Image: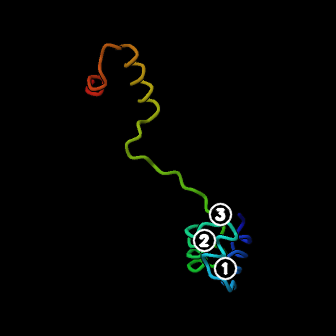
Amino acid sequence: MTAADKMEIIKMVEQSPIGVKATLEQLGIHRSTFYTWYDRYVKFGASGLEIATTKQHCVWNKIPYEIESQIIDFALEKPELSARELALR
């Protein structure tokens, strides 16, 4: 949904005489989704409703590709070793 769509839904829910839960059920929008949008709207205004780009999360224990390739090559050369023995070497 665009920011304009989200803003329109927020206005509809605010002005609805039947209550938040019933309005969201009629619109087919989950309450947690609506409240996430609403919280961002309250904190940041209409710009808070823009689609946020997801950040790539850095995995602290990710093995670099070069080292991973070396490990795989070593494991293929020594199929008799268990995973624990490979880890030790």
Location of residue 79 by image quarter = top left
Give SS at disc 3.
loop
Calculate the distance from the C-alpha at mark 2 to the C-alpha at mark 3.
Answer: 14 Å
The one nearer the camera, 74 or 33, is 33
Q: Which residue is at 42% across, 23% downward?
A: 72
Residue type at mark 1 is Val
Location of residue 27 by image quarter = bottom right
Calculate the distance from the C-alpha at mark 1 to the C-alpha at mark 2.
Answer: 9 Å
The reply to whether the C-beta atoms of the residues labelled 2 and 3 are less than 8 Å apart is: no
Local packing at callout 2 (Cα closer than 10 Å; few below 14, some 14-19, many 20+) is: some
**Of the image marks 1 and 2, the number of the one nearer the N terminus:** 1
Q: Which residue is at 66% across, 67% downward?
A: 50
Q: Which residue is at 41% across, 36% downward?
A: 63
Q: Which residue is mark 2?
A: 34
Residue type at mark 2 is Phe
User: In x, y percent, where is residue 82?
Assistant: 29, 20
Q: Which residue is at 43% across, 46% downward?
A: 59
**Of the image marks 1 and 3, the number of the one nearer the N terminus:** 1
Give SS at disc 1.
helix
Q: Which mark's residue is nearer the viewer, 1 or 3?
A: 1
Q: Quadrant of the C terminus?
A: top left
Calculate the distance from the C-alpha at mark 1 to the C-alpha at mark 3.
Answer: 20 Å
Q: Which residue is mark 3?
A: 51
Q: Which residue is mark 1?
A: 13
The one nearer the camera, 22 or 15, is 22
Local packing at callout 1 (Cα closer than 10 Å; few below 14, some 14-19, many 20+) is: some
User: In x, y percent, where is residue 51?
Assistant: 65, 63
